[in-house]
Image (cartoon, rainbow, N blue to C red):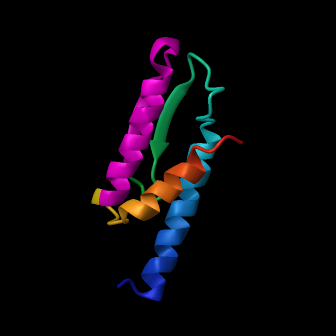
Amino acid sequence: MKTRDAAALETQLLLQLVGAVKTLNVSSELEAGTILSLKCPCGKVILQPIVVLPSIKDRQRGLLKSKIEHHLRDVHGVSKRTIAGVLKDAFAAN
């Protein structure tokens, strides 16, 4: 079981990460030519810069979700259930 401090830090990290994803505008309005890159509030790069291509836009969005999931699980030890909620919030239509 996590201590209150650890849980508070995890919550803060997840909120910052959701905010960062939302600023990427990863909704269906993502335009071709936009550069996607994401850095975790912990300082590690989750997604190296890539250019959005119209033919594979959905796959790139899926790649971003996958990278976030692996980072949260492997580096921060976040549960799958929590990750699912974070991804749902982060990728919800604005």
Locate residue 76 relative to residue 93 in the image: left or right.
left
Locate residue 30 relative to residue 35 in the image: left or right.
right
Q: Is residue 31 above or below residue 17?
A: above
In the rendered structure, which segment of residues is drawn in magenta? 45-73
Q: How many marks?
A: 0
Q: Is residue 28 above or below residue 76?
A: above
The answer to whether residue 46 shows anywhere in this view is no
The residue at the far top in this view is 55
Q: Residue at x 37, y 65 (%)?
A: 78
The answer to whether residue 2 shows anywhere in this view is yes
Locate residue 77 relative to residue 5 in the image: left or right.
left
Q: Position of residue 4 (x, y in %)?
A: 47, 87
Q: Position of residue 30 (x, y in %)?
A: 61, 26
**Quadrant in the rendering for residue 92:** top right
Q: Position of residue 93 (x, y in %)?
A: 67, 40
**Type of secondary structure dominating the magenta stretch:** helix
Question: Quadrant of the image for the C terminus?
Answer: top right
**Quadrant in the rendering for residue 66:** top left
Q: Residue at x 48, y 25 (%)?
A: 58
The residue at the far right in this view is 94
Q: Is residue 47 above or below residue 40?
A: above
Question: Quadrant of the image for the N terminus?
Answer: bottom left
Q: Residue at x 46, y 70 (%)?
A: 10
The residue at the far left in this view is 74
Q: Residue at x 37, y 57 (%)?
A: 72
Q: Is residue 39 above or below residue 11?
A: above
Residue 78 included in the magenta stretch of the image:
no
Q: Nearer the viewer, residue 73 or 81?
A: 81
Q: Position of residue 36 (x, y in %)?
A: 50, 31
